[in-house]
Amino acid sequence: MGLLSRIADLFGRGDDDALSIPPMDGVLKPNDRLDQAERIADFAEADNLAVLDGQLVCSSGDTLYRIDPESRQAEPIRRFGGAVTMTAASAGGLLAVGVEGAGIELQTSEGWRPIDLGDANRCITAAVFRSEHEMIVAVGSSRFACADWKRDLMSKGSSGRVLAVDLGTGATRVLGEGLAFPYGVAIGQNGAVIVAESWRHRLVVLASQPSARPQVLLDRLPAYPARLLAASGGGFWLALFAPRRQLTELVLLEDGYRAEMMATIPPESWIGPDFSDAANGDQPLQAGSVRQMGIMKPWAPSRSYGLVVRLDASFQPVASFHSRAHGQMHGVASVAELDGRLYAAARGAGALLRLQPEAVS
Amino acid sequence: MASSDTLTRLRYRYLSGRLVGEILSKSWIDSAIPVAALLAVLVALAALIPGVFNAGYIADLSRQLAEFGLVALALTIVILSGGIDLSVGSTFALCVLGALVGMNVLDIGIAASLAVTLGVGIVCGLVNGVLIGYLRLRAFITTLVTLVIYRAIYDIVFPRLASVIVASTPDSPTWDYLGFGDFYGVPVSFIVFAAVALALHITLSRLRPGWRLRAVGGARKSAFNAGIDVKRTVCLAYVASGLLTAMAAFLFSARLGSTGADTGIGMEISVLTAVVLGGVSLGGGRGSVGNAIVGAILVLVLTNGLIRMSTPGSVNQLVLGAILILAVLFDAKWVKNRSKILSRVYVSPTYLALPERSKAAEAAFALNDRLGAAEPIGLGIVEGPEDVVLDADDNLYTGTRHGTIVRFLAPDYQRSEIFARIGGHPLGLAFAENGDLLTCVGGMGVYRVDREGVVSRVADETNRSWLSVIDDSRLRLPDDLDVAPDGRIFFSEATIRYEMADWVTDALEGRGNGRLICHDPRSGKTQTVLRGLVFPNGITMCRDGQSLLFAETWTCRISRYWFDGPNKGKREVFTANLPGYPDNINRGSNGTFWVALLGLRTPTFDLAMRKPAFRRRMARRIATDEWLFPNVNRGCVVHLSETGEILDVLWDQAGENHPSVTSTCEHKGYLYLGGVSNNRIGRVRLPDADPEWTARRDTWGRG
């Protein structure tokens, strides 16, 4: 707390802005459209959707699957040496897979080829092909592996980077740095690189200089943004993997509490966002989430939530798809569009969803 | 870490800040600040002007106070009614004139003169009252106009009579006695003032007219809706104001025996300053006679002090004006922010460290799904069945949050009826030996329901403890009870600081706010037995008939207390460091006990309990729904042996049917489950239990 706000606090005008979470209102008004979506496949940790040759690619843990959305048949493509943290497919049929600790595995017509990104290998969170020769890769954190994302959040991490990777030589160039967990990346108009900066709850466009301050496109999001995908009809799809809560923001301000929590408690029991409200009895509960009369309130302050937002070309939300506290389809971190239908991977529920046709139109 | 934890613990044991909130919540705090200001001014004056407070000064001050104080009381009445009276100074002058005309000019005797004076005051007040009360004119503008009018009348009449007044001196010993006499050293006028003030205090604080006056001033519309004649009340407030001003004028006349052109000029400002400074709120409805007197003394002492320091009169006025502005500002802010400040400081968490749990202890609590298949009873019919008991005919009783006790009829419990209507949420239930149902009702007390369903009160208060700031005599949250073999009822009260709806906040405090209370039906007396318990919840008698078990929820501990026999007064831990928060305790078959855990400890909440400052900031800064809480979406039932060893643990693995279990009751081979935030009662079969065992037989040996 700064001196000024301390003084203001003394007079009862404390700056509580730091703890105010933007409401889900207007376009973001809650609904149950993710829970109503068709569940076409189950994977324990469904994530990292991509579209390759008219079929869906989806990961679960260290295994990558190919799914035919019509027959709903899933077949494993490959099992990797670490958890899959990213997939991206090019127009020409290249498939890039981020593997925690191992870097990128690129599938070409000749087979799999590794691309080593050095110390970025641990936390490749998203990628998009700029051409058949170059891809833009988001690195969530330079300090922690992807699986340790909670530690990065609670350390107020801002060591994320965005790299341009030459697929031929494997050479990398830094496009942006000092980002707070870039979790999604997309190419906008004029080739601008748009990044979802998760811990700062915003979308930014990278400046021409890597160290320059990026320009904010959309901020004050009520949830932590994850993957960003250019939509077929213009605009973008944004998956937001977990809700922001006042308690989380408070813990981020409470250095003493946070340090001891990180030092003495396993991360799955920390206060903070998560992909799902696991059935683990050790997990924190907020007073509003107490089950009353056999019912979990839809507006309960849960740790997890399901949210996909459609943005227009100027990055303003125009539609949203929710799974609320009483729903199941939480932790949607990745979406894909195929044949005019939107697919979403709900990692918290372990489900691959197909949304209603009108979602895309 | 350890030493800093010790420091934290000591700091919160001795300087928790709990008293700040409790003092702020008292209604006398409104008066405490002016009194403190008065004391400060007195001390400052005594220091600045040596020897200022001698007997002569006190006598002089009390005479001044008699007159000034009466006018302050007059204004207080008007302000309490939600109005203001600026015309007190002019009314005062007119009344002085009336008194002197009676005594000096007409020489009609003291009684008649008093009548004339009071008559003038009443007429002046009545004009204001009719205009403001009945014709609904604005009080400020109306009394401003009457101020000018009364003053004009005075200015017209006074010069014509001035010489007559000065020329003649009334020959009335009573008159002189009133002006200069004293009774055992106390000025007579002061005795008059004291009597009037006492009568007015009783009227305002204890009698119907006073309550109506405050109601009108506090919320005019609500007062109207409550059936109070608002117009008449307002009108009478001004009449009373005129009357009291006239009394002051009579005393003034008796003391001075003459008047001048400047009598009463500027009086409204100094009286207003006094009243507001004393703590009477300009918004109306808040204030007392005491406030007015404190304010009057304050202003008199200040002005006298300034005169003694030979400050010019204009500076004097300036100082008074400045003080008035400050007082008004403080009043406005105080009224607006008092409840805000209170809500910020009332919650006062303390340090509560629970021991770490060992792996072996965790293993005893391995998950199972023994409650998952619980057969629901009354699903959707009952809301909030905190406790369940069964009678000799196997009927099942439970309380609901609708304020009723519902009876489910044996043998299948499909049919139910409302057994009794109580009005509050019945929590703990137990049968007395004669078959009467005893219950702890949240927010009400302990009640008895006989076999016909007739409700009677057992206890709703206990002895007030001397050192408690908040009134702890009323029962706020009694929650479980049991009956000793001799008929004494022992019950726990979870917290004395919060109402039932705010029990969550008590979890955040983690302090010993609760107590164990005993009601003796033979003497009808209720006495607190143990204080400072941390959310004492479940209570059950031990089989020796001399001791009982009680659970302290937030400390995850069950203790045994001997209320009789050779160990009387002894208290020892029965079982501690449970993985969750114990609620009700009940006896089971084969000499065992059943404990319901209403929720589970979580590492983050345990950590928060060791960080009181974190919890205080959490309570201040984020919404109640967002507070960190124990995991009460998961609960279980623990079966304990006679000596406190864990025999068995029953879970509802999915946590959907019985997320939080607040009580259990074994009866003829079945275990019945209650949940204070659930909408059903559960029943599971206990394969190993004695199928004939009932709590009633265990306790009373029959039925």
Image: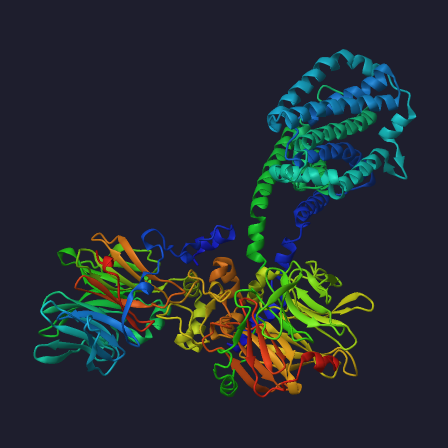
B257 vs A307, nearest the viewer: A307
Q: Residue at x 67, y 37 (%)?
A: B227
A128 vs B208, nearest the viewer: B208
* Quadrant in which residue A264 is drawn: bottom left
Q: Is residue B396 left or right of residue A301?
A: right
Is B465 located above or below residue A317 in the figure? below
Q: Position of residue B392 (x, y in %)?
A: 69, 76
B577 vs B547, nearest the viewer: B547
Does the rendering let one see residue B298? no
Q: Is residue B606 left or right of residue B693?
A: left
Is B141 located above or below residue B427 in the figure? above
Q: Extreme top residue here? A: B160
Snapshot colouring: rainbow
Is B19 located above or below residue A13 in the figure? below
Q: Position of residue B31 (x, y in %)?
A: 68, 46
Q: Is residue B702 left or right of residue A92?
A: right
Q: Position of residue B576 (x, y in %)?
A: 60, 81
The quarter in which the C terminus of chain A is drawn is bottom left
Q: Residue at x 26, y 79 (%)?
A: A83
Is B242 located above or below residue B684 in the figure? above
Q: Position of residue B194 (x, y in %)?
A: 81, 38
Does the rendering let one see residue B648? yes
* Quadrant in which residue A354 is drawn: bottom left
The quarter in which the N terminus of chain A is drawn is bottom left
B564 vs A100, nearest the viewer: B564
